[in-house]
Image: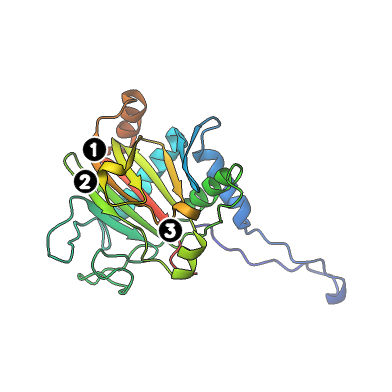
Amino acid sequence: MLKQYHSIPSPNIEDENKAKPFSLIMTDRVRRNLVFDRWRNFMFGRKELGPGMVLFKNYLTHMGQVDIVNICQKWAMGPGGFYRPSNRSGAKLRLHMMCFGRLWDPVTKYEKSYRSDGSAPPPLPYEFISLAENAIEDAQLHMKLLPSMLPDICVANFYSYGDRLGLHQDCDEHVGGLDRGLPVVSVSIGESAEFLYGHTRDENKLEKVLLESGDVLIFGGKSRRIFHGVRRILPPLDYIGLSQVVKETGLISGRLNLTLKQFQF
């Protein structure tokens, strides 16, 4: 994080004639733009999947993907890092998970602040906040009714080959935000994923889309409570681009997914 500098008073000037204090602290907006310019491709694809639901293809730059992997890796091996969570039956989920900013657990939801090992989630990186806010602003250019969202939690999942995530709804957040349709921002890096989504639990009636490295998916508004899941992990279509990310970060085979949401409303 940027250091905060105190304003320096001007010497040899009477109090009543002092100039306004000069601050060296960058504003949040400037800070967001600096991150955003480094992470977002100048050209990216856009596919509307439903009301309030849009997929940005190849949204993240190569450097953005590298930065995200490195940020996650920084915290992954310490307290609060990746672990394999369990469901209510005690069975382990077929993925590894860690949280930033706030703890979410498949069983306790948002009820606890610490995991069973006593570890707390690391702080939510401002770069992730920047990414979510600016991606939503891009979506709002074509979706005027899509609300803004300020994330206070990021759930990071890592899927190896053979891992998956069953159908579910992201509906543990504050009911006020859910009713307003505050969007979810999902970021994909690494191997591709076959993503299912729709307004029913019947898999035969669900739509599917391929999420590739660098894609960003947003769903809010009338699509905020959709059922969705990851059916399987597939080899990527763009081996060259992904191989560069792997080369620079050491990312193991699999898919890293960030899900950014606003719990508090």
Q: Which amino acid type is shown beneath numbered disc 1?
A: Ile
Q: Residue 239 occupies which quadrant of the picture? A: top left
Compute the Cα span from label 3 to label 2: 21 Å
Q: Which residue is mark 2?
A: 164
Single out the residue that lies furthest toward the top: 240
- Percent from the top left, x then y, of residue 52? 50, 48
Q: Which residue is mark 3?
A: 261
For label 1, the SS is strand
**Horizontally, is 11 left or right of 181 in the view?**
right
241 w.r.t. 36: above or below: above
227 w.r.t. 16: above or below: above
Asked whether disc 2 touches disc 1, contact meaning CB atoms under 8 Å apart, the reply is yes
Q: Which amino acid type is shown beneath numbered disc 2?
A: Arg
What residue lies at 54% left-to-right and 29% top-to-bottom?
Answer: 43
Q: Residues within 10 Å of mark 3 (few under 14, many from 20)?
A: many
Q: Is residue 118 visible?
A: yes
Q: Earlier in the sequence, mark 3 or mark 1?
A: 1
Q: Is residue 60 visible?
A: no
For label 3, the SS is strand
Q: Which mark is residue 233?
A: 1
Q: Earlier in the sequence, mark 3 or mark 2?
A: 2
What residue lies at 30% left-to-right and 31% top-to-bottom?
Answer: 247
Compute the Cα span from label 2 to label 1: 7 Å
- The one nearer the camera, 3 or 11, is 3
Q: Which amino acid type is shown beneath numbered disc 3?
A: Lys
Q: Residues within 10 Å of mark 1 (few under 14, many from 20)?
A: many
- The one nearer the camera, 117 or 228, is 228
What residue lies at 45% left-to-right and 47% top-to-bottom?
Answer: 218
Q: Residues within 10 Å of mark 2 (few under 14, many from 20)?
A: many
Q: Residue 262 occupies which quadrant of the picture? A: bottom left
